Amino acid sequence: MRIAVAATPEVAIPSLDALLASDHELLCVITPPDRPSGRGQSLNESAVSGWGNENGIEVYKPERDASFDSYLANTDVLITIGYGVILPQRVFELPRYGSLNLHFSLLPRWRGAAPVQRAIEAGDKVSGVTVFKLDDGMDTGPVYTQNRFALDADITSDELFVELAELGAEALLHALELMKSGVKPTPQENHSATRALKLSKEEGRIDWTQPATAISNKIRAFTSQPGAWTNFRDATLKIDTPVASEITLEPGALLLENKKLYVGTASSALEIGHITPSGKSRMPSSQWANGARLIAGDLFG
């Protein structure tokens, strides 16, 4: 099949590698224009743009309101993977067989922008990937394939993205074969749908009056973007690598014991593995605590 891929992030790379190695013909990749970033505001290309240039694949970078007609001429399928722009229906109906999306959840659970993070935040035991045919709704199209992935209790969103990216490549190739064979996708059950709303920085603030499990889920879901954070002496600290303990402390109370930093919650305390002070590099929490010179009554909050 003659394929175009509209994608932006690094998690699309395993699928692109799989398509390139397959019997399908990857015609081009479509990705957003280079954007300024960093202190110098220099232009940086997306991960997908870099991959296309390295592999000799045509790269198109249309502006948001550009026409896709010329990019999708003579294509059989358009595949979208975290493209970041909502395409109008007329665009994803241009290819011969229509368009597919690789989504990082078991739809209809977690439709929307942040399915990986919301699954971890909610304490889901299982996640996975879904390949579905695009329609005019938000992740509502009929499903070709789903692959499941069991979640460890300590998995972070960074780690889950890596696992699902690999799983997604396999699911995508299977979906293409089904589509080519004329198999009809299965409609989603809308009554069981949940929303995976986009994450905000403010939402990453840790409420230490919550139980340890809920806080751990939040921290691991928000690792590393946008980050889970707390205040300490009028400064902001990013928190990661939480571990359950049997120690009991008041919510937000700090204890440095045997080179381990514990923070109280509404249930048992959490051991915190790493801290990133504002404007500084990530460091072991014990190193941070030694530099902070903790005193009785110090709190996170």
Image: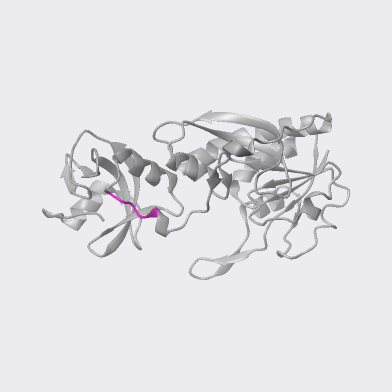
What residue is at 29 percent from the left and 41 percent from the top?
Answer: 211
- Determine which quarter of the picture holds residue 265: top left
- Residue 240 at x, y percent in the picture: 35, 46
Residue sitting nearer the eye, 48 or 244:
244
Q: Residue at x 24, y 35 (%)?
A: 245
Q: Does the magenta-highlighted stretch encompass residue 72?
A: no
View extreme (right): residue: 74
The N terminus lies in quadrant: top right
What is the residue that sits farthest to the left in this orientation? 296
Q: Which residues are magenta?
A: 204-208
Q: Is residue 69 visible?
A: yes
Tell whether 35 sits left or right of 90: left
Could you say which is closer to the camera, residue 48 or residue 81?
Answer: 81
The prevailing secondary structure element of the residues shown in magenta is loop
283 vs 53, left or right, is left
Q: Quadrant of the C terminus?
A: bottom left
Asked whether residue 108 appears in the rendered view, the answer is no
Q: Is residue 102 above or below residue 174?
A: below
Q: Residue at x 62, y 41 (%)?
A: 103
The residue at the point 80 percent across, 37 percent down is 24
Q: Report which quarter residue 175 is drawn in.
A: top right
Colouring style:
one colour
Q: Position of residue 125 (x, y in %)?
A: 46, 31
x and y percentages locating residue 52 in the rendered image: 71, 50
